[in-house]
Structure formats: structure tokens, C-alpha cells
Amino acid sequence: MSLLAGRTNRLVGSVIDSSTSLLQKQSHDIVRFAIGSPAEEAIPTAVFDDLAPAVLTADAFDYAATEGDPWLRGALLDLLSDTPDATTGERLTVTAGGMQGLDLFGKLFIDPGDLVVVESPTYTNGSATALSYGAELLEVPTDGDGMIIDELKAAVGRASRSPKAIYVIPTFQNPSGTTMSLDRRLRLIELARSWNCMIIDDDPYAMLRFDGEEIPSIRSLADGDPLVFAVRTFSKIIAPGLRVGWVDTDPGLQQLLINAKQAMDTCTNLPNQRLVAGYLTGGFLSDHLQIQRDRYRERKIAMQQALADHFGDTASWTDPDGGFFIWVTLPGVDTQGLFATALAEGVAYIPGQAFSPGHRFTDALRLCFASTAPERIREGVARLSRAVDHG
Ligand code: PMP
């Protein structure tokens, strides 16, 4: 008999994360639209080099406070103070990226069998985390304005029980790139209140808006409501390998978050917290974000243009106002089946069904435009089109 815990059945892994290692093993030239990483040129390595001698002193290699290094916490509070997400220290807990925020949510709130609503499509790792705590997932359709609230009501009605949590990526969603409208954000909060259920407000891309009007976060619209658990990260705005993020929650949860982290990783990686703190207090972020927004707008346009040139009206795709992703639908194409051909052709993407616990979206795929320069984007889309022709 296996000695493994029963819960290992529910550790489904992530097609996205697995593609990082799959791609590392390839030796031929591949245009990489698969992973949601910032552009390599966007990683502020020169600033990190300058900061390192001052911030990576011996004490930076010691254990850190579980709730986060005081320097980073102060810098983060300052950063947020000019935004509608202004917050307080008792609400802020530093995490190992957004993923640990999602995991902490699961640890604190999800009992086996709890109903957790997710957008359809949703972020694979978010649904995988909820599953790992035994959640039953309920997929609710989305459109260009985010989760369809009438469908949410109907789906919960059919389930005949209130959800424990609703997981949303409200801004430039992963994978679709679409943004939940203000009206839907407000209606979502109202419904969560009526059901006494949590909202996981996972919003890593909001600072990367390159077009359109800013929409207040669910966190700010709910105005400190304990039902909102906000997950944030520096991964998309500075660098994912730092593994530094934060959660913004009801102050009553902070001690439990600390206890959970102490049974998990003691504290978030201190050298990286110091690098982020140095970066923020050095005042580098604002110009950096402006440059990235312009860069990502240009790349999105290049990708859409290439899709129009190669696919015309045989495909459709989303038009994000920010973030990293375009979601492409290729009616009649099995995008999972196409993956090996596309990889051989020299282009990588994530098949649509990875973003649906029920394996929907078999004819869709997610492309990350952020990490590839416009000329390479055109080449990658040409390869994708050849793969579809051959596949
Ligand atoms: N949530 C969403 C919606 C994401 O896109 C990502 C990163 N792909 C994360 C959470 C995880 O962020 P991190 O890399 O900081 O753990």
C-alpha cells in the first residue's frame, strides 16, 4: 500500500510551470509565448548590481521577521499610500510571491469539500492550489467584462450551497487578458456579502495598464471588508525569480498568516526582500513601470497585427488594455494536440484546457506577448500559423 497521503491525489501540478522545465530541455530555437514572465530587458539587473553592496550586508542573510522585513514593509506602505490600495502594516504580510498568498488562503479557509468558484478560464495555479486543499471547483463563464455575475448567481443556485470563496483575477486576467468592469466588481462584492463568502482578489497586473481608464481594485471597493483577501506580487512589475509578494487582509488574520508561514517557510527570502526594498526606496519603480507599459503596448499591437496577418478571420483573440496575455480561439483546432507540432516548428504557448478544471477551451490558447520583442513575435506567430497548417 502506498505511504503517500491521500491529499497527494489532489496535487495536480501546473502545465504552465512544467513548461518552464520542458522548454529548458529544448535545444532548437523556440519563440516562447508560454510563460508569463516580464521581458528580459525589463529586469533591472543594473540597478540590482548597484544596490547589492549596500543592501546585501551580512544581516540580510539571517532569518527575517515572518511578516516581512521592516524596511520592505515600510517601502511597500509608502508605495501604496499614493494609490487607492493604501493600507496599514497590520493588514500587510510579505509572502514568497503571489503563489504563497494563494496557498495561505487555502490553508486558512479551505476545508475539503468546500465550494470555490473560479472564472472559466482561470489561472491554472490558483485553481490547483484550491484543489490541493480539497476544494470543489465551480467554473463560471466570463466575457469581455470578466466573470458574468448572472451566471455566477445561477451556478451557485444550481449548486444549492454558498461558496466558501470566489477566486478572481480582475485586471488583465490570466489567461484571457480581459478586465472585470466596475459594475461587476461591485455586484461581486454585494453577492459575496450576501453569501458570507470570501473573495480572493488576485491582481498582479493592475500596475501594468497601458491603455484605458484605471478601475479601482476589488480590495479598495470593498473598503477593508474582511471578506476580501488580496494577493499581490512583485513578480510581474519587477522580477518573478525574486519570489516576493504580499497579501493584504483583515488585520485579524495576520497572526494566523504568520503561524501558517512559520509552519511552512519561516520567513520570505531576506536578500530578495532587501533588493526590492532598495529598489522601491531608490524611487526606481515609477519610471520602470512607464517604460514597461510602453514596451508591452507595442508588443501587444505587434502580436495582434501578426495574428490578423496570419489567421485573418479563422481565429479570434482578446484585446487587453494591459498585462501580459492574449487569448486566442482557433475554432476546430485541438490546441493540446497541436502543441508538439508547434514546439517542433519553434513556438511555445499554453493550451487553453490548462486553464479550466473541466478541460474546456480545447480550441483556445494563451500567448504571452510581454517577454518577446516585436520582430520575434511576428516570427513566432508565423510559426504558429505553419503549425496549424501542418497539424
Ligand atoms: N496570480 C496570477 C493571476 C498570476 O498570473 C501569477 C503569476 N503567473 C501568480 C498569481 C503567481 O505570482 P508569483 O509568481 O508571484 O507567485
Image: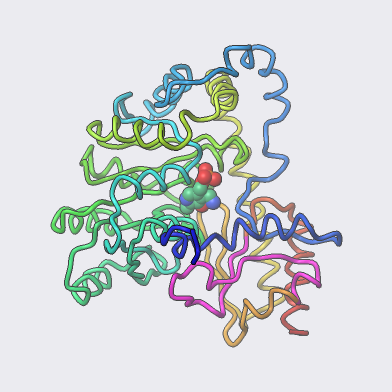
Vertical placement of 268 versus 332: above or below?
Answer: above
Of residues 326 and 264, the one nearer the viewer is 264
User: Residue 311 at x, y = what percent?
Assistant: 67, 78
Q: Is residue 255 left or right of residue 208?
A: left
Q: Quadrant of residue 232?
A: top left
Image quarter hosting the C terminus:
bottom right
The furthest residue to the left? 194
Q: Quadrant of residue 161?
A: bottom left
Q: Quadrant of residue 345?
A: bottom right
Q: Residue at x 41, y 31 (%)?
A: 262
Vertical placement of 237 versus 199: above or below?
Answer: above
Instruction: Specify whether residue 11 is painted magenta.
Output: no
Of residues 43 and 27, the one nearer the viewer is 27
The furthest residue to the right? 28
Snapshot colouring: rainbow
Of residues 46 and 298, the one nearer the viewer is 46
Residue 208 in view in this figure: no
Residue 374 in view in this figure: yes
Q: How many marks?
A: 0
Vertical placement of 83 versus 168: above or below?
Answer: above
Q: Residue at x 80, y 72 (%)?
A: 344
User: Residue 211 at x, y = what percent?
Assistant: 51, 50
User: Residue 339 at x, y = what percent?
Assistant: 69, 74
Q: Which residues are magenta?
A: 341-367
User: Residue 69 at x, y = what percent?
Assistant: 46, 21
Vertical placement of 45 versus 25: above or below?
Answer: above
Q: Is residue 292 left or right of residue 196?
A: right
